């Protein structure tokens, strides 16, 4: 009964989203104020229906209703409660229901928090969002209904959730990621709505900025959590693999950075307007492309869901419609858009242009590497290739290094033009001092000197020092936007430090160990004490015990496990680590390779936590910008129709 | 005055376009070079047995791990196994390290590594999927003509 209610409310939601797509737009067309105002109430209804539908699916999971096929495939009566709840989005159907729910949530947020938008704009934006929701909801209903029944012969117990997903990571990673992916629909809808009016003004950029920042901050959290999850759960100590699906989330993230910066220039100085619109369209298109790559099964990936060609074709058609439609509209309308202002080559505008170019090229290089296996297969008639991490490292890293240099300097440039002083006279001591300091530190920390590592470390420290000095000189930070920017930039610098130090100075080995044996690694002595059997709620495990010491002093006891889950007989590795700000000691248990011997992987990874701390700092920066009073004040101005080109 | 500004505006625009074109061309060339050096072709056991796969070049090979073929060395972490297409072709794979959790006899795997002139595949990395029903598309293709459930039907069964 409950699943049928959920299914029914999903059908109603599809109807409402079609109404949301049509009615306000019709109101704009007929200049009918009443129709134009229907948007917010329809959006509320849509969200309530989808939330109810989602609740029904969750109820079915909690009640172990294995007559629902999706529940039977992804849950089990022995599954702990928190994983029954997160299993709702543990596979394709449910995760797309979450996606659609989040899309309707953003739509509702736009309806609720956009008092500053004109009647006309609000109607147009909600219509575009309604259209997207209709697309998502019909995809759910027609190709991936999570409420399909297994009647009359339903299994007595479920097939269990993939053990890899029985983890805190699954509870938080997908919702955050989807908040980001789908959130980019809002700047997209704003761009499309503005294109249809033919007027791109500073107000449009100002409306878009907080939404873009929010979506991007969520995506940052999602990617950071994903990397952390990979590190302790499936990565054997790795934290980024250039996997097709990681790239799928990384591309809209990179494009989102370009969009955020370009919006700033469009708002403050009225430049790059048509370019910014194009970025808003591309960012959301890359989000959709990500969905296509994950859900169509065209690429080999750890994340790939089960392959069903009809789903792939449906998303592909949706993708073509959205991208094709918006680009056609762009080509038709954007030629009329003129940038008003000019700028010098040493101005902040020019810096932002460089930022945008580098980010777009970086995104393109990732896109090329991700889609190349597909292209190759088509061109060569079925020959299969994979593109390895060396490609991405060779191409992506140099571009990003250039980007960091621009990032160190640009926050101190001025709009229109920057005098030479500001850049050179104020910064030369740091330019000179930081490499010297870093060389000394590196010489002390490690015996060997790695030139690239020193270069990148210098850059990161340089960025941090300049930010700190700026903070200190300014006395107090003038706005939340500025504080957010500084936090985000500092976060990037922290993450870069983490990445480069981890890559350069990590030590790791795969060894065969008998109980009692020990291994020395990076100053630590790691002793294998033995293995015992442990029983978990739905698994049996071999739990090993390792004693970690440094110079004879006790550091930690680590207990990595090798689990066998009872339902699917799936084997899972649970690594254990002694985390620390300066280093992680990481031990993972491989297989039993002899009578008493086990394969063991040990790592000492300096600064690895900085990668995720940096990521979280970046996201925090994104969220802080939302507190900027300017966005609220501008809303009042706009509603009085007095907004001009004032910056 | 006005005329002068127009000129500098146009010059600016031209410079921007030239800059973008050069940067794009440079980046594309660089990316394609890097791509060419870092793609790894997939070869089925049949192709390797027939001698179609290059020796000493990093490639990917895959198939089903033959039952009873996994042999571990007494010392260290060396292991060898045979991948086959379940027809006649069999290739011996040698690997030093920790095998993935889902590695099992009778399971589809993909190995990244190099073929030696003796016809043994020395793997740097062995991939098996984290989902018991998932079959790497490459392996599914290599097994296509054999009377085995394909990746698609397996997954359909999972989701029916």
Image (cartoon, coloured by chain):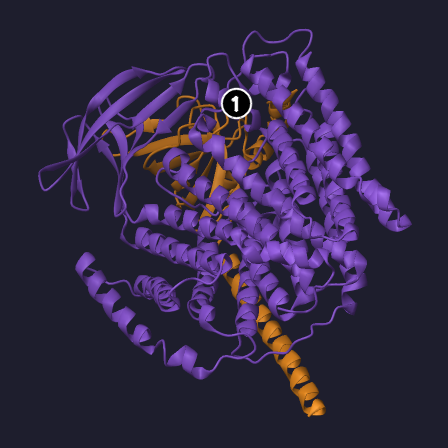
Task: Using the image, determine if residue A480 lies above or below residue A265.
Answer: above
- Please give left or right for residue A394 compared with residue A583 in the image: right
Instruction: Determine which quarter of the picture holds residue A425.
Output: bottom left
User: Is residue B121 shown to the viewer in this render?
Assistant: no
Task: Using the image, determine if residue A484 lies above or below residue A18.
Answer: below
Report the quarter where the N terminus of chain A lies.
top right
Q: What residue does disc 1 label?
A: A85
Crowd rating for badge 1 (residues with CA inside 10 Å; few <14, some 14–19, many 20+): some
Residue at 50% in and 24% down: B132
- Please give left or right for residue A375 compared with residue A172 in the image: right
- The hue of chain A in the figure is purple
Residue at 8% in and 38% down: A552
User: Is residue A506 shown to the viewer in this render?
Assistant: yes
Residue A463 location (% of width, % of height): 38, 64
Q: Nearer the viewer, residue A562 or A177?
A: A177
Chain letter, colour orange: B
Q: Give the structural element (helix, strand or loop) at label 1.
A: helix
Task: Using the image, determine if residue A240 lies above or below residue A449.
Answer: above
Task: Using the image, determine if residue A451 lies above or below residue A600.
Answer: below
Q: Nearer the viewer, residue A105 or B55?
A: A105
Residue A259 location (% of width, % of height): 59, 58
Residue B79 location (% of width, % of height): 33, 32
Report the quarter where the C terminus of chain A lies.
bottom right
């Amino acid at each position: 009964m409950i699943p049928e209610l959920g299914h029914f409310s999903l059908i109603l939601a599809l109807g409402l989203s079609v109404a949301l797509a049509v009615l306000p737009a019709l109101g704009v067309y007929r200049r009918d104020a009443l129709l134009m105002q229907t948007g917010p109430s329809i959006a509320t209804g849509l969200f309530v229906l989808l939330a109810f539908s989602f609740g029904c699916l969750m109820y079915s999971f909690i009640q172990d209703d294995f007559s629902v096929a999706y529940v039977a495939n992804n849950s089990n009566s022995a599954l702990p409660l928190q994983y029954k709840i997160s299993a709702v989005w543990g596979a394709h159907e449910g995760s797309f229901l979450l996606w659609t729910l989040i899309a309707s949530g953003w739509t509702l947020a736009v309806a609720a928090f956009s008092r500053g938008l004109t009647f006309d704009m609000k109607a147009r934006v909600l219509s575009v969002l309604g259209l997207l929701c209709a697309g998502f909801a019909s995809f759910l209903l027609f190709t991936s209904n999570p409420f399909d029944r297994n009647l009359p012969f339903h299994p007595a117990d479920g097939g269990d959730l993939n053990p890899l997903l029985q983890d805190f990571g699954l509870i938080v990673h997908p919702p955050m990621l989807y908040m980001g992916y789908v959130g980019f629909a809002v700047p997209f809808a704003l761009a499309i709505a503005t294109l249809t009016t033919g007027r791109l003004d500073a107000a449009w950029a100002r409306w878009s900025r907080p939404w873009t920042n929010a979506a991007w901050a969520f995506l940052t959290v999602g990617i950071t959590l994903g990397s952390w999850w990979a590190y302790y759960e499936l990565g054997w100590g790795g934290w980024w693999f250039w996997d097709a699906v990681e790239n799928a989330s990384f591309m809209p993230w990179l494009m989102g950075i370009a969009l955020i910066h370009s919006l700033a220039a469009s708002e403050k100085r009225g430049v790059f307007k048509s370019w910014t619109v194009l970025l808003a369209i591309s960012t959301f298109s890359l989000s959709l492309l990500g969905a296509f790559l994950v859900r169509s099964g065209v690429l080999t990936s750890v994340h790939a869901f089960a392959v069903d060609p009809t789903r792939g074709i449906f998303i592909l058609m949706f993708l073509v419609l959205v991208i094709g439609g918006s680009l056609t509209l762009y080509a038709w309308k954007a030629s009329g858009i003129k940038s008003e202002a000019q700028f010098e080559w040493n101005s902040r505008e020019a810096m932002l242009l460089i930022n945008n170019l580098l980010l777009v090229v970086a995104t393109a290089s990732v896109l090329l590497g991700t889609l190349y296996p597909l292209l190759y297969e088509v061109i060569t008639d079925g020959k299969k290739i994979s593109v390895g991490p060396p490609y991405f490292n060779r191409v992506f890293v140099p571009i990003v290094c250039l980007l960091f240099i621009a990032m160190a300097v640009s926050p101190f440039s001025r709009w229109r033009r920057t005098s030479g002083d500001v850049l050179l006279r104020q910064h030369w001591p740091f330019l000179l001092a930081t490499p010297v300091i870093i060389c000394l530190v590196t010489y002390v920390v490690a015996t060997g000197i790695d030139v690239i590592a020193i270069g990148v470390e210098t850059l990161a420290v340089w960025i941090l020092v300049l930010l700190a000095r700026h903070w200190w000189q300014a006395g107090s930070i003038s706005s939340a936007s500025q504080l957010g920017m500084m936090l985000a930039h500092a976060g990037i610098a922290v993450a870069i430090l983490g990445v480069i130090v981890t890559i350069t100075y990590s030590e790791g080995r795969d060894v065969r160990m008998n109980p009692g044996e020990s291994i020395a690694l990076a100053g630590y002595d790691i002793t294998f004490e033995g293995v015992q059997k442990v029983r978990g709620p739905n698994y049996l495990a071999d739990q090993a015990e390792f004693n970690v010491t440094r110079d004879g002093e006790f550091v930690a006891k680590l207990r990595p496990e090798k689990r066998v889950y009872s339902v699917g007989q799936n084997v899972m590795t649970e690594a254990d680590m002694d985390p620390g700000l300066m280093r992680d000691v990481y031990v993972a248990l491989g297989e039993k390779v002899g009578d008493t011997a086990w394969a063991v992987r040990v790592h000492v990874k300096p600064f690895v936590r900085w990668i995720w701390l940096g990521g979280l700092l970046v996201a925090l920066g994104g969220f802080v910008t939302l507190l900027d009073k300017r966005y609220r004040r501008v809303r009042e101005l706009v509603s009085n129709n007095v907004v001009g080109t004032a910056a | 005055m006005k005329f002068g500004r127009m000129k500098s505006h146009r010059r600016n625009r031209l410079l921007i376009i030239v800059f973008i074109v050069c940067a794009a061309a440079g980046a594309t060339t660089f990316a394609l070079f890097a791509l060419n050096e870092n793609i790894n072709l997939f070869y089925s056991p049949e192709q390797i047995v027939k001698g179609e796969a290059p020796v000493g070049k990093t490639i990917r090979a895959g198939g089903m791990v033959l039952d009873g073929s996994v042999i571990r060395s007494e010392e260290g972490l060396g292991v060898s196994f045979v991948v086959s297409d379940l027809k006649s072709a069999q290739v011996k794979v040698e690997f030093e390290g920790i095998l993935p959790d889902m590695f099992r006899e009778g399971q589809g795997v993909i190995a990244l590594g190099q073929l030696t002139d003796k016809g043994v595949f020395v793997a740097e990395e062995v991939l098996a999927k984290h989902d018991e029903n998932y079959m790497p598309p490459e392996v599914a293709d290599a097994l296509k003509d054999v009377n085995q459930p394909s990746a698609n039907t397996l997954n359909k069964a999972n989701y029916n």
